[in-house]
Image (cartoon, rainbow, N blue to C red):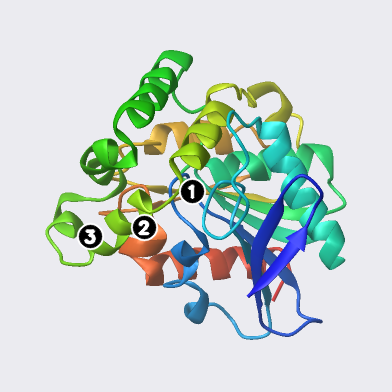
Amino acid sequence: MLTADLGDVRLHYRIDGPEDGPPVVFANSLGTDMRLWDPVLPLLPRGLRMIRYDKRGHGLSTCPPSPYTMGALVTDVEKLLDHLGVRDCVFVGLSIGGMIAQGLAVKRLDLVRAMVLSNTGARIGNADLWAERIAGVRAGGIESLADAVMERWFSRSFRDTPELELWRNMLTRQEDEGYIGCSAAISGTDFYTTTASLRLPTLGIAGSEDGSTPPDLVRETTDLVPGSRFHLIRGAGHLPCVENPRAYADALTGFLREVGHV
């Protein structure tokens, strides 16, 4: 296991693939850790330098007191990539990870040559929704929200499988304070204007059964970037990399080839 001391936070990260391979960075969703990408990585082309990390408050990374800002989350991964000497990566971000991708691309285009906005938005929800979510976690912990989150995350057919328990466990074993902190960051973020200023290859990925970031939101956000492309994975929810890793890997591989990254 690897950790990067960035000053105010220590991030747990992992690198798979050769040190000289084209870098692909993965940022996961609220309430998950880097294992979110386990189903997809073995299906991607060999030779990539695949970098995953646990954002602050999640997984094995430091959990500072909440609230967090999106600027802090963007700075965390910016410092990590500088620490690792990464430039010109393809940044794959899912949900809050997709917001981090947008913020990083605006701030440091030297780090990001292309981005994948998966199951995300330039703005997700509203202040009242996130205030209610935060209050729920403060009152009863993540466990009190877990069943409702599973309904938003996964299609009905997936929720009927034993595998659902694994992802419910991952959610409830994250730090309450980290979930609250990142919820506050999402609540305070509106990237419509800044994302519309971007000019880089962009792929949007959505799940047809996504109850957190519906396909129309993902498409609207992706369309902010001229020349972008949108891909819908049917029958999958908020985490299509879990429900249909083959379809997700195929979409990502096609994009990597389009931008000359493989």
Residue 111 vertical position relative to residue 147 in the rendered view, above or below: below
Type of the residue with mark 2: Met
Instruction: Measure the C-alpha gap from mark 3 to mark 1.
Output: 16 Å
Q: Are marks 2 and 1 in contact (CB under 8 Å)?
A: no
Q: Which residue carries the number 3 mark?
A: 164
Q: Secondary structure at mark 2?
A: helix
Q: Quadrant of residue 139?
A: top left
Looking at the rendered image, the quarter that the C terminus falls into is bottom right
Q: For the residues carrying marks 2 and 1, which lies nearer the camera in this image?
A: 2
Q: For the residues carrying marks 2 and 3, which lies nearer the camera in this image?
A: 2
Q: Are marks 2 and 3 in contact (CB under 8 Å)?
A: no
Disc 2 or 1, which lies upstream in sequence?
1
Q: Quadrant of residue 75?
A: top right
Instruction: Measure the C-alpha gap from mark 2 to mark 1.
Output: 12 Å
Q: How dense is the environment of label 1, judged by Cα within 10 Å: few (below 14), some, or many (20 and up)? A: many
Res 242 seen here? yes
Between 4 and 233, the residue placed more toward the observer is: 4
Disc 3 or 1, which lies upstream in sequence?
1
Q: Which mark is residue 110?
A: none
Q: Which residue carries the number 1 mark?
A: 29
Q: Secondary structure at mark 3?
A: helix
> Residue at (61%, 47%) from the top-left corner?
56
Q: Which mark is residue 170?
A: 2
Q: How dense is the environment of label 3, judged by Cα within 10 Å: few (below 14), some, or many (20 and up)? A: few
Where residue 101 sits in the image (x, y, percent)? 66, 45
